[in-house]
């Protein structure tokens, strides 16, 4: 009997090719688009072609027709609002810089979609992510970097659970991006040359502060820029406008380059400093998820990434308490940002990760 897989189809080339590859491998493939964003104008659809709006549905439906597979649209708006938008807003209000794609992957694209897929008799879910899943010698499942380092997406998937990994397929992790587009072209998929979607799909203009004001119905409180000694050096527009390491768009001229060093939500202050002051060798993280091992045993040598496009660097991991890990890098790292993920690797496999707290 053929195994059944539900493919999360965003209307993009990667998930479309994932559906094609799995069908070729003999699976019974069902395409599903998750409607997760609340509303989207036709203008926004045309401009963005994002992964979570109404514009994804028509493209995914056309691909499903081309492949001859069943296709459905499932409503996940409530889960998306709670686990992604509300979290995004709260984190910025608390002076942190969230990663909504990681939250969406963990709680919507996997937890909610997997649950519904298993309910309709599926054996697996699949996505078009550039990552691979491997079973370690200890029996645990872990993510492995994709064949193409430039597109590797394991950083954004570190929070997946063992059960989720066990029921997930990621076929495009074995291919380069150019190969994926070539497969789509050769197969006659209508999205072969569709541009990749933007980073944060629900804020198409990248104006996070205005989005937060609209979402909360409250005007963002202004405050003061201060230096590292606490001296006031000018007013700012509100803490949701800034992130650690930012230089451009500060709206203040001091005759030299300055950068956001710290955000203090309790006082509404944004601390500015020199570039050199952004570097540190140590950070701490919580909300941990371990993948290739159940937990850390003593000090562990690893490599860690502190943001999506960070190349990663060698470090030592040690547990401070049951919920907090300390990461000590061999070399100073620039602008480790509270709210962002830190992801640990042993070779090509994800050891685990967590959320930076300081």
Image: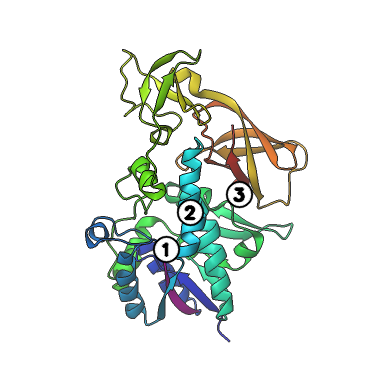
- Magenta segment, which residues? 28-35
Quadrant position of residue 169: bottom right
Q: What element carries label 2?
A: helix
Residue 148 located left or right of residue 132: left
Return the x and y of residue 327 as percentages of the image width and height. 64, 33
Q: Distance between the residues labelled 1 and 2?
A: 10 Å
Q: 210 and 196: which one is in front? A: 210
The residue positioned 51% from the left and 12% from the top of the image is 229
Q: How is the image coloured?
A: rainbow
Quadrant placement of the N terminus? bottom right
Category of crowding for the residue at label 2, using alpha-carbon neighbours closer than 10 angstroms: few (below 14), some (14–19), many (at least 20): many
Q: Which of marks 1 and 2 is nearer the N terminus?
A: 1
Whether 230 is drawn above or below 178: the answer is: above
User: Marks 2 and 1: in contact by CB < 8 Å?
Assistant: yes
Q: 127 and 330: which one is in front? A: 127
The residue positioned 73% from the left and 47% from the top of the image is 295
Specify the label residue 36 is tagged with.
Answer: 1
Is 31 magenta? The answer is: yes
Q: 182 and 30: which one is in front? A: 30
User: Can the viewer see residue 146 in this picture?
Assistant: no
Q: Distance between the residues labelled 2 and 3?
A: 23 Å
Q: Which of marks 3 and 1 is nearer the N terminus?
A: 1
Specify the label residue 84 is tagged with.
Answer: 2
Residue bearing the label numbered 3: 350
User: Marks 3 and 2: in contact by CB < 8 Å?
Assistant: no
């Amino acid at each position: 009997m053929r195994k059944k897989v539900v493919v999360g189809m965003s209307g993009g080339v990667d998930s479309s090719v994932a559906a094609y590859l799995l069908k070729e491998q003999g699976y019974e493939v069902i395409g599903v688009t998750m409607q997760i964003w609340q509303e989207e104008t036709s203008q926004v659809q045309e401009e963005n072609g994002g992964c979570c709006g109404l514009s994804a549905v028509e493209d995914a439906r056309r691909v499903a027709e081309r492949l001859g597979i069943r296709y459905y649209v499932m409503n996940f708006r409530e889960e998306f609002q709670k686990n992604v938008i509300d979290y995004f807003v709260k984190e910025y209000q608390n002076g942190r810089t969230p990663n909504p794609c990681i939250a969406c992957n963990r709680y919507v694209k996997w937890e909610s979609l997997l649950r519904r897929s298993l309910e309709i008799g599926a054996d697996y879910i699949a996505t078009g992510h550039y990552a691979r899943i491997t079973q370690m010698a200890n029996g645990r499942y872990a993510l492995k970097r994709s064949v193409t380092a430039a597109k590797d997406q394991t950083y954004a998937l570190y929070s997946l659970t063992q059960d989720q990994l066990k029921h997930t397929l990621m076929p495009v992790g074995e291919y380069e991006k150019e190969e994926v587009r070539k497969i789509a072209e050769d197969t006659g998929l209508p999205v072969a040359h569709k541009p990749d979607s933007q980073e944060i799909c629900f804020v198409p203009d990248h104006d996070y502060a205005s989005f937060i004001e609209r979402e909360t119905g409250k005007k963002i409180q202004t405050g003061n820029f201060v230096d590292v000694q606490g001296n006031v050096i000018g007013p700012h527009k509100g803490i949701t406008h800034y992130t650690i390491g930012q230089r451009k768009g500060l709206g203040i001229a001091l005759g030299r380059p300055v950068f956001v060093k710290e955000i203090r939500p309790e006082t509404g202050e944004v601390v500015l400093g020199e570039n050199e002051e952004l570097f540190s060798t140590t950070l701490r993280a919580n909300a941990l998820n371990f993948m290739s091992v159940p937990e850390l045993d003593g000090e562990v040598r690893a490599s860690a990434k502190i943001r999506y496009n960070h190349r990663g660097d060698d470090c030592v991991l040690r547990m401070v308490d049951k919920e907090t890990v300390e990461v000590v890098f061999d070399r100073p790292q620039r602008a480790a940002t509270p709210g962002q993920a830190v992801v640990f690797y042993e070779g090509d496999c994800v050891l685990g990760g967590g959320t930076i707290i300081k």
